[in-house]
């Protein structure tokens, strides 16, 4: 049985439909058109080059290495500054924004199939093994395999701790989902910059996260992604 989490509304686990529906997009009213200059690529050429090639990729020849993960999280998620707050935990300032500087999204990594989860500690910039979690990690990987074969890829799980955001905000769910999306987006760009393959998955990993990792009923799965090397060497 899934434990209830205060301040959380279950939105279900998205999966592709067996039979697709046809949909007609909204027809927006037309008005005056003001063309915009395409100067962004000249003003930020390095970023433009990365964004021009960014794609979700699924053909991995090897899992991410420790060096890959170190560079990835350094670019996208490492805590740069922490400040004491009255909420019972520090506010954190990282590469990516979060609601009220409350970073309630955790990253877990299963580097190779069959291994345990490792939690990314953004303050210390280190991976911390969750001992005894190999069965939990493998169960979630098998669920991911039903959507996209995970093969040689490392598996990343985005795990929300809703109580942190709820300490400051009423109705925090939409903030948590937006924070998860922002974090996923930053990691996808960092992966592209490093020449790594990255593929977000539709399923969230919930409720298996709550059932197998969280004995206190305070965590929810809000996303999964694959990460790996596209070339050997």
Image: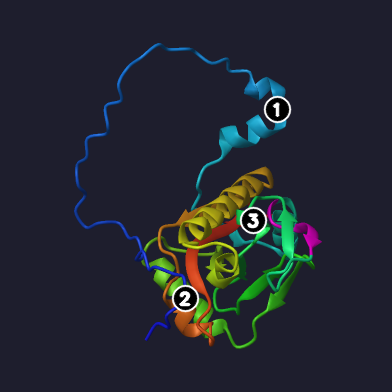
Q: Is residue 228 magenta?
A: no
Q: In the drawing, does residue 182 fall left or right of residue 121? A: left
Instruction: Find disc 2 in the rendering and name its residue.
Output: 6
Magenta range is 76-83
Q: Which residue is mark 3?
A: 100
Quick check: can you spot residue 24? yes
Label 2 and label 1: CA atoms lie apart by 43 Å
Circle on res. 44: 1
Q: Is residue 200 above or below residue 218?
A: above
Q: CA distance from mark 2 to mark 3?
A: 19 Å
User: How is the protein colored in the picture?
Assistant: rainbow
- In this view, 45 is above or below 153: above
Distance from the alpha carbon under mark 1 to that under mark 3:
28 Å
Mark 1 vs mark 3, foreground winner is: 3
Q: Position of residue 3 (x, y in %)?
A: 43, 83
- Of the image marks 1 and 3, the number of the one nearer the N terminus: 1
Q: Callout 2 environment at 10 Å: few (<14), some (14 to 19), or many (20+)?
A: few
Instruction: Answer with left or right where residue 227 lies relative to residue 77.
Output: left
Position above or below: 34 against 150: above
Earlier in the chain: of badge 2 and badge 3, it is 2
Instruction: Please tell me which residue is depicted at 62% across the width and 45% down the height of the picture.
Output: 189
- Residues at marks 2 and 3 touching, judged by CB atoms closer than 8 Å: no
Closer-to-camera residue (135/94)? 94
Q: Is residue 78 magenta?
A: yes
Q: Quadrant of residue 64?
A: bottom right
Pick the front one: 216 or 62: 216
**x and y, in percent, of residue 191 in the image:** 63, 49
């Amino acid at each position: 049985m899934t434990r209830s989490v205060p301040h959380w509304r279950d939105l279900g686990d998205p999966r592709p439909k067996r039979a697709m529906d046809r949909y007609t997009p909204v027809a927006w009213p037309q008005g005056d058109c003001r063309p915009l200059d395409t100067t962004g690529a000249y003003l930020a050429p390095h970023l433009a080059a990365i964004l021009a090639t960014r794609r979700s990729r699924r053909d991995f020849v090897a899992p991410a290495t420790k060096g890959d993960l170190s560079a990835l999280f350094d670019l996208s998620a490492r805590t740069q500054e922490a400040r004491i707050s009255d909420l019972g935990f520090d506010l954190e300032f990282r590469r990516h924004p979060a609601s009220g500087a409350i970073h309630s999204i955790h990253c877990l990594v299963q580097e190779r199939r069959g291994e345990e989860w490792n939690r990314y500690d953004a303050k210390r910039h280190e991976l911390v093994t969750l001992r005894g979690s190999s069965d939990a990690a493998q169960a979630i990987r098998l669920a991911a395999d039903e959507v996209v074969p995970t093969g040689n890829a490392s598996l990343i799980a985005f795990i929300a701790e809703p109580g942190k955001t709820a300490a400051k905000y009423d109705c925090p769910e939409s903030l948590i989902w937006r924070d998860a999306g922002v974090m996923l987006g930053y990691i996808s760009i960092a992966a592209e910059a490093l020449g790594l393959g990255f593929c977000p998955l539709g399923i969230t990993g919930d409720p298996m996260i709550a059932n197998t990792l969280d004995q206190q009923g305070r965590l929810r799965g809000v996303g999964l992604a694959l990460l790996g090397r596209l070339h050997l060497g």
